[in-house]
Amino acid sequence: MSTEPRNIRDVVRFLRQRGELGLDEIFLERLTREQVLRAANEARAQASGEASGEASGEAGGEASGEARRGAQAERRGVPARAPDHGTARADASQPDDVEISAAQVDIAGLEYSELASVADCCQRCRLAEGRTRVVFSDGNPQARLIVVGEAPGANEDRTGLPFVGQAGKFLDLLLASVDLSRKDSVYICNVLKCRPPGNRDPMADEIELCSPFLKRQIALVAPEVILAVGTFAAQLLTGTNRPLGKLRGSVYTYEDVPLVVTYHPAALLRNAGWTRSTWDDFQLLRQVMDGS
Ligand code: SF4
């Protein structure tokens, strides 16, 4: 009889069993990467059609806290749902009322919708020349958790959304393993909002020029926890240049917000040997979110 998981809940249950048993290979030993990605793919499709909260499985006891966060966020001008920075924006012409460039404005003083609009027109660094879309965010701007990645890739540049494609589906799966979902309980963005050509690494000056957007996003969303995925996000937010393998496994703070770091899911897909460490990092994340 086939042991292949049929949907996201099967995969999550399987991952947890493996994790609880302390097995080094969380899934790649008995479940191929293709099987995991296929299940994650189905999970993405299911999540888009499911009622709010069903996929995340977050405890009902958090509801009042979420409502309080929502009210506080609305006072900061942060919407309950992320504006569509993807398809809809691509079909729209540039907003008429945003004629000032990002270089001219005080990014630290912008409201959420202003920040997204200014980023959409940004020419602060060389990456503006080659981009198709600015990739601002996805998920819930009132979430307790922000996931910060590195930079858009080809799929993200095409769609205007962060973490799409295989790495994004894998991230969704890892989040689901600790009862989180980008639809309800996570806000996702990158250090850079525009794609570096050929998916090369971000350059130091690009990070410096773009990071005010991230800093302001974090201030406006006001998360309770930050997860940095990949070397560039981890080094920027921890303020160090230590390698990720040495950084992970500890809880840091960024502007007084607890910060956990882990491998980028794209790197994880290339190197299954980091699976155990990533699993541990997500358990640490959950512990921090639970306050334990
Ligand atoms: S990467 Fe950032 S700083 Fe550079 S053009 Fe895009 S939004 Fe502006």
Image: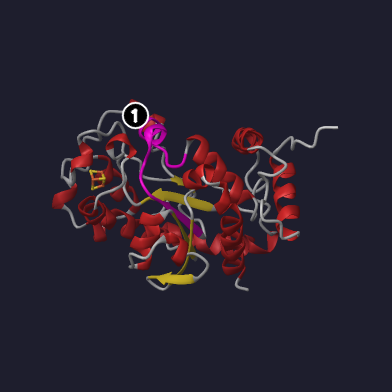
Asked if residue 189 is among those painted magenta in the image, a careful observer would answer no
**Considering the image in quadrants, where does the N terminus appear?**
top right
What colour scheme does the image use?
secondary structure
Q: How many discs mark residues in the rendered view? A: 1
Q: Residue at x 45, y 66 (%)?
A: 246
Q: Residue at x 60, y 34 (%)?
A: 41
Relative height, residue 80 to residue 221 (above, below) = above
Q: Nearer the viewer, residue 142 or 6?
A: 6
Q: Residue at x 50, y 70 (%)?
A: 250
Q: Position of residue 183 (x, y in %)?
A: 55, 45
**Considering the image in quadrants, where does the C terminus appear?**
bottom right
For the record, the magenta segment spans 145-163
Q: Is residue 190 left or right of residue 42?
A: left
Which image quadrant for residue 159? top left
Q: Nearer the viewer, residue 186 or 262?
A: 262
Within 10 Å of disc 1 (Cα), the crowding (few <14, some 14-19, many 20+) is some
Q: Nearer the viewer, residue 237 or 247?
A: 247
Q: Secondary structure beneath disc 1?
A: helix
**Type of amino acid at the residue the image marks with label 1:** Ala
Q: Is residue 278 left or right of residue 192?
A: right
Residue highlighted by disc 1: 90
Relative height, residue 272 to residue 212 (above, below) = above
Q: Nearer the viewer, residue 43 or 13?
A: 13
